Amino acid sequence: MILSNVEIVSAIKSGVFNISPLAGMDPTQSPFNTSAVDLRLRDKIQIPKPGPAAFDLRKPDIASFLDRNSEILQITDDQPFPLKPNRFILGQTIELVDFPLRPGQRCYSARVEGKSSIARTGIIVHFTAPTIHAGYKGPITLELINLGPMDFLLYPRMFICQLIVEEVSGNPLDAPNQFKGQTNPAGIVPHS
C-alpha cells in the first residue's frame, strides 16, 4: 500500500520512520505530491573516471572500488554541473531516510523515482535501483544518466527525485546491505 502525503507526514510526526531535513511539512505544499515527497540533490556528486579498470561485481566492496576510481565534485548555485548526454554520475539526496525494522509493528520501505519534469529532459535518476529497503538508514544515492540531447544543469538543493513510501506486509528480518549507513555516493560506510 502506497502512503498518501497526509500519511507520510503523520508517520514522520509519530516517529514511525523519518525523512529529514524536509523542505516543509505541509502535505498540501512542496515538497509533497498526493502520494510522494520530493527530495533534493546534495552539493557533492561523484564522477566515475574512465580508464582501464573494469567493474567486477564478483569482487567484494564495490563502494571502495568506485571511491578509488571516481572524482568528488562540489557543485554550487554559481557553478552547477553540466551533465552531458550519455554521461553517468552518482549523486545523493540531502534528505536522510530512516525506515527502521519494528518487530511486531508495521514497517515501511520506499521507492525513489524520477520526477516527470526531469524525465522529460532525458534524465534518469535511479537507473535500475529504486528500492529503499525496510531497515535502511542514510542518504539515498542517485544513479544519474543523461539520455537527452542537451546538457542538463545539476544544482545543489534542486528537487531531483520523489520518494514513494509503502507499507511492508509482515515483519522483515534484518539482512545484510552493503550500503546501509553510506556517507558518500559510492556507498562508503564509516567503520565503527
Image (cartoon, rainbow, N blue to C red):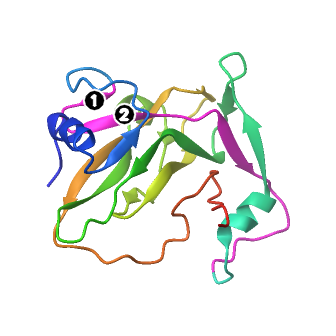
Residue of label 2: 38
Tag 2: residue type? Asp
Indicate the secondary structure of the residue bearing disc 1: strand
Where is residue 68 shown, x and y percent of the image?
80, 61
Q: Does 45 lie within the magenta span?
A: yes
Specify the farthest residue to the bottom: 58
Asked whether, in this view, residue 178 is left or right of residue 61, the answer is left
Q: Is the N terminus in the top left, top right, bottom left or bottom right quadrant?
A: bottom left
In the image, residue 133 above or below residue 162: below
Residue located 49% across and 37% down the image: 122
Q: Which residues are magenta?
A: 31-57
Specify the farthest residue to the right: 52
Asked if the residues shown at circle 1 and circle 2 are in contact, with their CB atoms under 8 angstroms apart, the answer is yes
Q: Is the C terminus in the top left, top right, bottom left or bottom right quadrant?
A: bottom right
Mark 1 / mark 2, whichever is N-terminal: 1
- Of residue 189 and residue 79, the one placed in the foreground of this image is 189
Tag 1: residue type? Phe
- Of residue 158 and residue 177, the one placed in the foreground of this image is 177
Work out whether residue 147 can be spotted: no
Residue of label 1: 32
Residue located 35% across and 45% down the image: 18
Asked whether, in this view, residue 30 is left or right of residue 72, the answer is left
- Of residue 29 and residue 159, the one placed in the foreground of this image is 29
Q: Residues within 10 Å of mark 2 (few under 14, many from 20)?
A: many
Q: Does 173 lie within the magenta span?
A: no
Where is residue 113 shown, x and y percent of the image?
37, 46
Indicate the secondary structure of the residue bearing disc 2: strand
Residue located 56% across and 44% down the image: 92
Where is residue 107 shown, x and y percent of the image?
23, 61
Residue 89's label in the rendered image is none
Residue located 31% across and 36% down the image: 37
Q: Residues within 10 Å of mark 1 (few under 14, many from 20)?
A: many
